[in-house]
Image: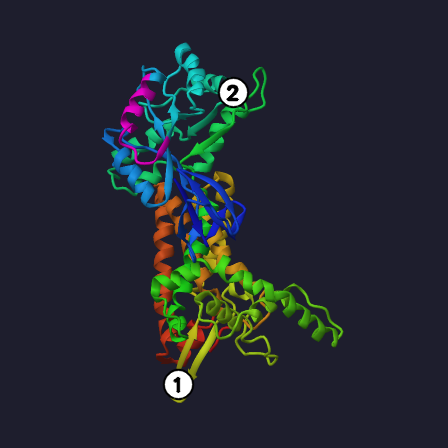
Amino acid sequence: MKTLLKGGRVVSGAGVRPADVLLEGERIAAVGAEMTAPGAEAVDCTGKLLFPGFIDAHTHFDLEVCGTITADDFRTGSRAALAGGTTTVVDFAAPDKGESLHSGLRRWREKAEGHCACDYGFHMTIDDWNEEISREIGEMMDQGISSFKMYMTYPAMMLPEGDMYRALLRLKEAGGIAGVHCENDGVIRALTEEARAAGRLSPASHPRTRPAPPEVRQEVAEALFKEEAPPWQPPHVPSFAVHVCGTIGLSVVFFVLIPVCIYTASYFPYAAARGNGAGFWGMAGQSASWLWDTLPTHLERLPAQVEQLARTMAEEGKTPGVLDRIDSFFRVIPGGSANPVDIMLKNQHFMLTYHQGVHTPHPYESYWYQWIFDGRPILYFRDLDVPGMKSLFASFNNPLVSWAGLAAFFGVAVQTVRRRCGRGLFILIAILSQFVPWLPIGRILFAYHYFPTVLFLCFAIAYLMDGMMARRREGCRLAVYGFTGCAVGLYAVFYPELIGLYMPTWYAQYFLRWLPSWPL
């Protein structure tokens, strides 16, 4: 049976392009433009994205582990996979300790055959090592199973490091691929016993009993087998680590993708007011497809805009720089566009250039190096009508939080380097993601532009406090409680100035003006 998918946009590793797709049975027979196929059923895919079937290379269907069984078996899991566009799964065949690899493979085939609704394959778990299993490696390869997983934790599956080394040598010889679940079992057990003894039994204790980030555990595992030390040579087996989630990847999600999605969604009402009738989910789809549907059109118009800018600047004896070219991109976006992303970008350009043409100094403008020391708060309102009294409405950070937060930033940086701590790196990226983008801005800035950074300075302070409390020393506990109490006390002291209450002039003079640059 042939099926011809017409008029869609094909998504592949090379990008997105208009193309037709010819299917023969369950296989893609051809991809090309304006294709014809006599006898094939034609399906109109205009306006649709055509993806190849996805492959989920890491599933655990009907797996008994730690006294329970995974929620999905091959019947339910494969149907859920197909509902999401995944047409192939690769599950882990797991023989019990003492069993042969063949018995594990036979049992998993029985679980899958007649029940799995999509294509499937297997990785093989190695949880024991002996001459018989070493021989079976080659036989598994002959049956099409080329990847083998080993565990550094879980007693029922854990492989001793010496046996793991021997297994790696055998896999290198057979041309197989090694997958490793990387964790330090001994440290986890000790920390788990400590947490139980202390009564810390909530889910929050789970990450605390695994203090090293996944990347460090991976490095420990690799160090065992890649150390360049005689008398042995490292096996250099093609390998992958499972259950590894990078700190930088998480940071991109939390500080780029999620904020961009939320911020773009806030422009949906503006798009609707301009005549966009797609509704919430329709506009969400327009935003998601903006990179390949709308951006190419803007880029096509960009060279003409840059050329026009170059001619204009040439009359003044100037040439366009990088910032000028970036500015040109924003200007090619149509001002009346009803696309939410276009509206968002135009607004960002407006805000970026809002004070750019102002040349008269503002009494409360500030620079980034003043922000980090809380050196230039902004005064919104001041009333001197009542003799002997003063009313101020100003905006600035708690000085204790600003100054201690700056120290905490460097303290977290030191600990991140020394301990290779993923949580510390996450906090550092958060602080820099909010602060660094303001450094190259060429317009007037104010103290409130620094306020989002302060939230993550608080995280840095809390991170160091958590470490101090974990030491269980009286001095550390008193320091944490003392700092917290002082921060709360300072908030109470400055509260009248934060909301514009009347206060005696002497109170403002002697309690609220710590630096000459502070408003009074």
Q: Quadrant of the N terminus?
A: top left
Q: Look at 54% across and 78% down and name the residue there.
A: 363
Visible residue check, residue 1: yes
Q: Hey, which residue is sitting farthest top in the picture?
A: 131
| Residue nearest the viewer, comparing 428 with 369 | 428
**Could you tell me the amino acid type at mark 2?**
Lys
Query: Is disc 2 placed on a helix, strand or loop?
Result: helix
Label 2 vs label 1: CA separation? 85 Å
Asked which quadrant contains residue 236, the reply is top right
List x then y, in percent, for residue 371.
51, 65
Q: Which residue is mark 1?
A: 388
Residue 492 image-quadrant placement:
bottom left
Task: Spot the residue most to the front.
Answer: 38
Q: Nearer the viewer, residue 87 or 334?
A: 87
Q: Residue at x 33, y 42 (%)?
A: 82
Query: Percent x, y for residue 268?
Result: 38, 68
Magenta region includes residue 112: yes
In this view of the protein, which residue sits in the foreground, 64 or 383? 64
Q: Earlier in the sequence, mark 2 or mark 1?
A: 2
Assign a secondary structure to mark 1: loop
**Residue carrying label 2:** 172
